Amino acid sequence: RKEVEQDPGPFNVPEGATVAFNCTYSNSASQSFFWYRQDCRKEPKLLMSVYSSGNEDGRFTAQLNRASQYISLLIRDSKLSDSATYLCAIRGLGNEKLTFGTGTRLTIIP
Amino acid sequence: DADVTQTPRNRITKTGKRIMLECSQTKGHDRMYWYRQDPGLGLRLIYYSFDVKDINKGEISDGYSVSRQAQAKFSLSLESAIPNQTALYFCATSQGFGSNQPQHFGDGTRLSIL
């Protein structure tokens, strides 16, 4: 089993819709969780950290489910500009390295 | 100006050549990382450094070497480039304290080995 897994998609979603995707991880001792956004041929940019109690930033909501070992990202009222690949990144307890998922590709359709 | 700067942005070279990719940062972060990204494989860690005298291998360090000349600079070398090292390379930085520190990426270097 991979350390971090994501559904590669693509997710094709109409503008204004709500979309959610998950990222599963295998190390139950994982401690830090992040979502990044990557546009085509560009660098990953931090979208948001994921906190144990869940957190929200505008239209974006991130949640952590430790029991089932996954994090999720929900995007409400999706915009054309949300089209990108979304990467999850996870750091294990005592491990200084981030492990990245391969990303979920999202396309918002007008 | 970008906080994490990579040079060159694009490079095409031939098999067997020595290549150096440079990364500099103005964020004041202690930790620096080199990744490569390939389609379908995601980001893979090549080397990382926690300070000037610290070098650590990542998951795919074979064929690569690094140098941390100063806190702000971290260079990646391909001693004798081969075609399967064709990829998009990213440098990243993070703060040195707290487990919940994210990494911040440079613009990337697109490297093609012919």
Image: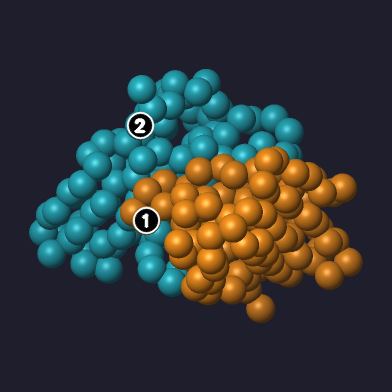
Chain colours: A orange, B cyan
- Marks 1 and 2 share the same chain: no
| x, y percent for residue A32 | 73, 48
The amino acid type found where label 2 is placed reads: Thr
- Image quadrant where one finds the N terminus of chain B: top left
* Residue A8, visible in the rendered structure: no
Instruction: Please state if B82 lies on the left or on the right of B6 as rendered.
Output: left
What numbered label is drawn on residue B91?
A: none
Residue that label 2 marks:
B5
- Report the Cα–Cα distance between label 1 and label 2: 19 Å
Residue that label 1 marks:
A40
* Residue B38, visible in the rendered structure: yes
Residue sitting at 57 percent across and 34 percent down?
B94
The amino acid type found where label 1 is placed reads: Cys
Q: In the rendered image, which quarter is residue B100 located in?
A: top right
| x, y percent for residue B52 | 48, 28
Residue sitting at 57 percent across and 63 percent down?
A101
